[in-house]
Image: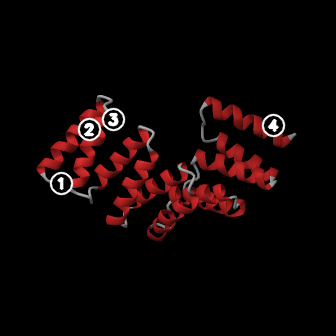
């Protein structure tokens, strides 16, 4: 990043600190225009668009970045996540596959793969992906939560109950804890 890009980036950070999301987006767009390979600025721009509830613009920003910087796993993860949020699990599979080629045991990527399979209704594949994610990071509460839901949907109540117990051991917030306890009681009755 050159001096002008650094100044713009710093101004964008100041704008974000002030809560001026529109101004931050304009400044970050300028940084990315100066250097399309600036991963930090492009990812921050995409997150800011998501904060502004403009996921389509975030998706376009990340897609352009991933065309230029093809092997940046965090950017691929962001792109997959925003595509899943937009209800496009097939579109999310492209950056997920690329990220898995680069980091086959990345727990976050495997979790996103599980989410994509779940969105497509492929519950067995989703369960396998979630389990592979947990093999890499057994303390991921969100993944235990998703695995419990998948096992329940598959009719495997014993596996669902065990997943809810594991989720509870991760220290969820009160609302999720209450939901998990209710699901566990339902499954055990």
Say few, some or many: other residues with alpha carbon within 10 Å of mark 1 (under 14 / 14 to 19 / 20 or more).
some
* Point 15% across, 43% down: residue: 7
**Label 2: which residue?**
13
- Residue found at the far bottom of this picture: 101
Viewer-nearest of discs 3 and 2: 3
Distance from disc 2 to disc 1, alpha carbons, whole Å, reads 15 Å
Q: Are marks 4 and 2 in contact (CB under 8 Å)?
A: no
Distance from disc 3 to disc 1, alpha carbons, whole Å, reads 22 Å
The answer to which of 150 and 22 lies nearer the viewer is 22
Say few, some or many: other residues with alpha carbon within 10 Å of mark 4 (under 14 / 14 to 19 / 20 or more).
few
Viewer-nearest of discs 3 and 1: 3
Which of the labelled discs sits on residue 1, or is there none? 1
Residue 11's quadrant in the figure? top left
Q: Are marks 3 and 4 in contact (CB under 8 Å)?
A: no
Distance from disc 3 to disc 4, alpha carbons, whole Å, reads 44 Å
Quadrant of the drawing holding the C terminus: top right
Q: Indicate left or right for 163 with 3 as reference.
A: right
Query: Of marks 3 and 2, which one's residue comes earlier in the chain?
Result: 2
Q: Position of residue 100 (x, y in %)?
A: 49, 67
**Label 3: which residue?**
21
Query: Of marks 2 and 1, which one's residue comes earlier in the chain?
Result: 1
């Amino acid at each position: 990043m050159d001096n002008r890009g650094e100044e713009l980036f710093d101004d964008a950070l100041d704008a974000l600190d002030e809560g001026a999301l529109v101004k931050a987006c304009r400044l970050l767009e300028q940084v990315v225009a100066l250097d399309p390979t600036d991963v930090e600025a492009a990812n921050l721009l995409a997150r800011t668009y998501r904060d502004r509830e403009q996921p389509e613009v975030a998706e376009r920003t990340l897609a352009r970045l991933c065309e230029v910087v093809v092997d940046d796993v965090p950017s691929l993860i962001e792109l997959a996540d925003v595509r899943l949020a937009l209800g496009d699990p097939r579109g999310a599979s492209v950056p997920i596959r690329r990220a898995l080629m680069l980091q086959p045991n990345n727990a976050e990527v495997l979790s996103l793969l599980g989410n994509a399979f779940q969105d497509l209704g492929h519950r067995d594949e989703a369960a396998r992906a979630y389990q592979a994610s947990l093999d890499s990071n057994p303390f991921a509460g969100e993944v235990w939560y998703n695995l419990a839901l998948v096992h329940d949907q598959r009719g495997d109540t014993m596996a669902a109950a065990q997943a809810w117990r594991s989720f509870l051991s991760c220290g969820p917030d009160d609302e999720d804890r209450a939901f998990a306890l209710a699901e566990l009681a339902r499954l055990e009755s």
